[in-house]
Amino acid sequence: MDIFCRDVKPFAPPTLTEIRYWLAIIKEHALLIRLGLPCDQTELSAEAQQYIDVFADLERRSSHLGDDRELFCFAGVASVAAKRIFVFKRRILHCLLECRLPGSCLYPLFVDHLSREAMYFVKLLGKLRYGYMRCPVDAIVSENVFWLRIMTDHLAFIRGMIDPSERILGEQAASLGLTFERLTLRARDLSTMLWHYRPTDELVRFQRELVQSTTELRQFLIAAETLIKQCSAVSTIHPALAGHYRRETEHFLVILEMIREYLSCAPSSPGDE
Ligand SMILES: [Fe+2]
Ligand SMILES: [Fe+2]
């Protein structure tokens, strides 16, 4: 099930570490949007800059939180900011879909991708107020769908931004992209097959495969980021974007570890529940 589905919430807990991770990520989104806008779009560019400042300020404030009550209040403020940037991203997406931003370097799917990540953050923060999903397996299978689509998108974006002369790098991205497309399709199948059910051995095996493939993806992204930063590979990928994709992949690995830990002690048959 998709993160836009009303009942879907992240599997990850709304801890301070998770919230701080997302504040940094969403701040980078505002920067990436500002960098990709056409230079004549001064109003949208100023709005993107405002979001950079808002999220930088929230990041600063998040390092001075004392107790759970303060975290709860802070999450309310962060949630308002996250909802606003979600709306901003959707507005830009709609402009792109209607060709109202000629000369933009932003793919519509890229902006849609950024809005899905903002929605994930909104829902993560909402867990503090509205609680968790009733069936943990629903949260796990939805988490897989969310992150696998994100990883697949990253590879498609990278493929489109690597210079055609960089054949080996392009082929590596394409091959990993195929792997992640297949994993995404399988995750979607499992997300409906196991909905309101329980973890199965197939899910446990699938989670192991995800760790393996995502670790491989992480290695590829580390190598690509190094090449881009050293200017040893030609592409239109901004070094900040390469680092952003790598950090999101590393975060997916952290979540996969949380899921592995949960599954290692979850009931394995209906009678155990
Ligand atoms: Fe992102
Ligand atoms: Fe992303």
Image (cartoon, rainbow, N blue to C red):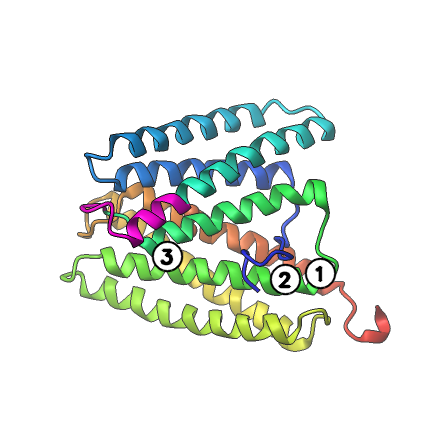
Compare marks 2 and 3 and give the one earlier in the sequence. Answer: 2
Q: Amino acid at mark 2?
A: Ile
User: Mark on residue 140?
Assistant: 2
Separation of disc 2 and disc 1 at Cα? 6 Å
Residue under pointer 3: 154
Q: Are marks 2 and 1 in contact (CB under 8 Å)?
A: yes
Is 106 or 25 nearer to us in this picture? 106
Q: Is residue 78 magenta?
A: no
Looking at this view, is 55 or 60 the one in front? 55
Q: Is residue 84 left or right of residue 94?
A: right
Q: Is residue 198 left or right of residue 64?
A: right
Label 1 sits on residue: 136
Count of labels in the image: 3
| Secondary structure type for disc 3 | helix
Q: Secondary structure at mark 2?
A: helix
Q: Which residues are magenta?
A: 90-104
